Amino acid sequence: MSNVLNKEAFILPEGVIYLDGNSLGPMPKSVPARVAQVMNEEWAQMLIGGWNKAGWMAMPMDIGDSVGRLIGAPKGSVVMGDTLSIKVYQALAAGVKMRPERRVILSDTGNFPSDLYMAEGLVGLLEQGYELRTVAPEEVAGAIGDDIAVVMLTEVDYRTGRMHDMKAITKLAHAAGAVMVWDLAHSAGAIPVDLAGSNCEFAVGCTYKYLNGGPGAPAFIYVRPDLADSAEPALSGWLGHANPFDFDLNYTPAKGVERMRCGTPPVLQLAALQEAMKVWEGVEMADLRTASIALQEQFIAEVERDVPELTLASPRDASLRGSQVSFRFEQGYAAMQAVIDRGVIGDFRAPDIMRFGFTPLYVDSADVSAAVAIIKDVMSNALWDNDAYKVRSRVT
């Protein structure tokens, strides 16, 4: 674990054990200075010249390559921009267009709701008999038939951490003639991913979780290189045009994955993400995965030994689990608020999930044991049974 642990690179408040990097990563220490540089030396001094002089326009592709290294994507196949929901929509729309004779988008009931909402919106817009079909996660393989246009799945379940087999499901999708779209929101920076080896057509993901890009950090989209010059982006924005500064009235898509760009790049957010990505230099995902599993296994063993009130909701087999561990408790929201109040930050997912993320860049074995001691105190002494902890905040 010594080759991935890098606590000194992050701003971590005193007295806090942060087990919620699967929801929002902490700030790397070098980020504020980099963002200040962009504001004070680039924006303030260069003004509009920053697009050329400071390389702002190239940031979506440059950072895309940094992210691509962590997800097994070839150089030039990942571009940054917009939100994850927008990228889901683009990937789905492009995939459906590739299979015009088919009318079904297949997903699972464990998928993140926003992905399903975007699919519903696309289906409603297309009409013509299109359908979003959802099945239980364990039933996906058997549901991939010759009527499926696109299979859209999130590799790691946001509630439980249950993990789909990317290569196996992609192979089944292709055998049935379907297009494969993967959401890597809980994969990028958490587990080894091999997009090129999986042969999937599209993948999308966010960067504010394990990649520590900050709240609202831009999402990414991957397009398999052989499709990059033919995939139709659906949301054909100005910066996805082949020559945006020719100001043509008609859209001509850019070459390669840049056609998936839509609006103006969020330069300050991209600068924060670009700086945050430096903590990954020299980190191998296989080493990170080994360290992550060790932390998770320790956490599960200690919680089950000391906190019988909680029931494991994540797969027990570490090979079937991402980089988070979830436990069920009927009063999980109140219990999590009590735990947070005592310095262990996790989060809650309805209806009864207490969720803890394990990021070996800044979490170590001592943190795990200290966290379990606090959880034990909260549960064994029913410290959660306080009206103040039962009032739901807007963000849980």
Image (cartoon, grey):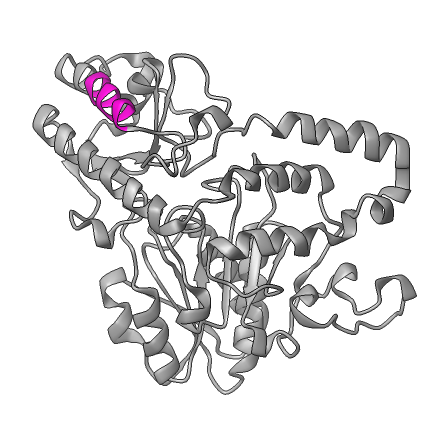
Q: In this view, does 210 lie to the left or right of 44?
A: left
| Viewer-closest of 293 and 245 | 293
Q: In this view, does 90 lie to the left or right of 145?
A: right
Q: Position of residue 236 (x, y in %)?
A: 72, 66
Q: Quadrant of residue 35?
A: top right
Q: Position of residue 31 (x, y in %)?
A: 62, 30
State the count of labels: 0
| Viewer-closest of 66 and 237 | 66
Q: In which quarter of the image is residue 231?
A: bottom right
The question of residue 374 being in magenta is answered with yes
Q: Position of residue 323 (x, y in %)?
A: 32, 44
Q: Is residue 269 left or right of residue 388?
A: right
Q: Is residue 86 above or below residue 257?
A: above
Magenta stretch secondary structure, dominant:
helix
Residue 367 visible to the viewer: yes
Q: Residue at 30% x, 60% y: name it.
A: 164
Q: In this view, does 148 lie above or below 20?
A: below
Q: Is residue 352 above or below residue 95?
A: above
Q: Residue at 31% x, 28% y: name it.
A: 364
Q: Is residue 203 left or right of residue 349?
A: right
**Residue segment shown in magenta:** 365-375
Quadrant containing the N terminus is: top left
